[in-house]
Amino acid sequence: MGLDIGRWLPLFPVRESCLYLNHAAVAPLPQPVAEAMRARIAEQEAVGSANWRGWLETEMSVRALGADLVACRPEDVTLVRSTSEGLSLVARGLGLGPGDAVLVSEEEFAANVAPYLMLQRDGVEVRRFPAPGGKILLDEVVPLLRPPVRVLGLSWVSFHTGWVAPVAELAEAAHARGVLVILDAIQGLGVLPETFPELGVDALVADGHKWLLGPEGLGLMVTTPELRHRLEPVLAGWLNVEREEHSMFLSELRFHRDGRRFEPGATPTILVAGLAAALELLLEAGLAEIHARVTAHNRTLTRLLLELGWQVGSPGSSSRLAGIVAGRHPYMPSHEVARRLHERQIEVSARQGWVRFSPHFYTTAGELEALKVILAKL
């Protein structure tokens, strides 16, 4: 049964000011998310920390909701400030050194490369494989999964063109060869319905401000118990260590074994309230229904761009589709197209020479038809 889209449209005030096709950058806040954060601010303004027990309950709710979203256990969930932070915690915590190598693509987003390049200071080799236009081919990557490669760093969806990586197949091949798979899921989580067990990776990391429709500065990291117990925490604080009940003193360092293992200090409770509301919204709408609508938008955008003579760099209907459609105007640079569309209250991004369109489930078919008319006049 499809979504009753009319019920959801009022929850997205951004529709009153523009046509927002830029969820692969930063999503506009849905009304329930913004209201949850405003309520949390008002509470702290009025009574300070008097209701701190409620803050902890909301934090536990985020772990449970995140677990529901990806079909893992709440104890597998870590709250991170960004995708970059989560990937860095994993990369640094593995204890890799001379004689080890990490494999990442040549067209990878910087956040999924920088943590591994940092390891070069410790003698770790970073190997790159071709991914033309962001497309990762299974047959080209699998032969590279050999010693000294210890880690495969992947993006679920290419940030600039929207190609979906064959994650489950690569994870199976990697594990058969003793290679860990760490997934940057920020362009997939919230729009693609596959679960953590179905993906088969060792860790998944995604900030909340794109397809999850949450605020910037808070995201989810999911780790298997095996990887989590292997990772050495690189940050230590009063909250990721075991202490005696009701005591703030610490005499020896013993880290938690669940997802809190990587959370050294206070969580941003205002952002936690917002992310909880965002996850509730997505789960109520349903990832299968969301993916169906976004897939339909993807096909509509691809068709209209081709009709207008654009080059399309995203996958066609015979391939797995996510939320990104990348196109090149017949003669106008991508940044100029994005600027002109912005002047017409249409929000897109320019990435690596492509104009990147990224609608979410609440975008309507009528809005995309209106976009076609505007694009034809560019």
Image: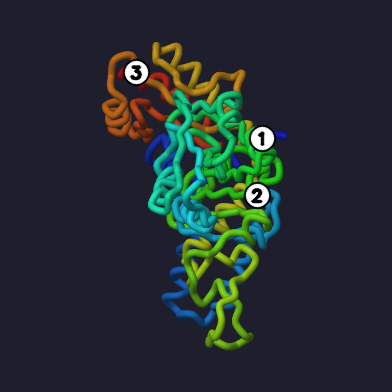
Q: In 3D space, how far apart are the residues under numbered discs 2 and 3 (Cα atoms)?
A: 37 Å
Q: Is residue 167 left or right of residue 309?
A: right
Residue assigned mark 1:
173
In front of the other: label 1 or label 2?
1
Q: Residue furthest right?
A: 1
Q: Is residue 124 visible?
A: yes
Label 3 Cα neighbours within 10 Å, binned few <14 / some 14-19 / many ≥20: many
**Secondary structure at numbered mark 3:** loop
| Number of numbered labels in the structure image | 3
Of the two numbered discs 1 and 2 on the same chain, state the one appearing first in sequence: 2
Q: Position of residue 156 (x, y in %)?
A: 55, 37
Q: CA distance from mark 1 to mark 2?
A: 25 Å
- Of tags 1 and 3, the one toward the viewer is 1
Q: What number is the disc on residue 69? A: 2
Which residue is rendered at x = 34% and y = 18% of the image? 329
Q: Earlier in the sequence, mark 2 or mark 3?
A: 2
Task: State the quadrant of the C terminus.
Answer: top left
Q: Residue at x 52, y 44 (%)?
A: 184
Q: What's the residue type where badge 1 is placed?
A: Ala
263 or 99: nearer the eye? 99
Q: Amino acid at mark 3?
A: His
Instruction: Identify the element where label 1 is drawn.
Output: helix
Q: Residue 268's x, y, as percent? A: 47, 66
Q: CA separation, marks 1 and 3?
A: 39 Å
Q: Which numbered tag is attached to residue 329?
A: 3
Instruction: Give the amino acid type for the residue marked by disc 2 in the picture.
Output: Leu
Q: Nearer the viewer, residue 49 or 64?
A: 64
Question: Does the CB distance between marks 2 and 3 fall below 8 Å?
Answer: no
Q: Nearer the viewer, residue 25 or 232?
A: 232
List the single residue furthest toward the front: 99
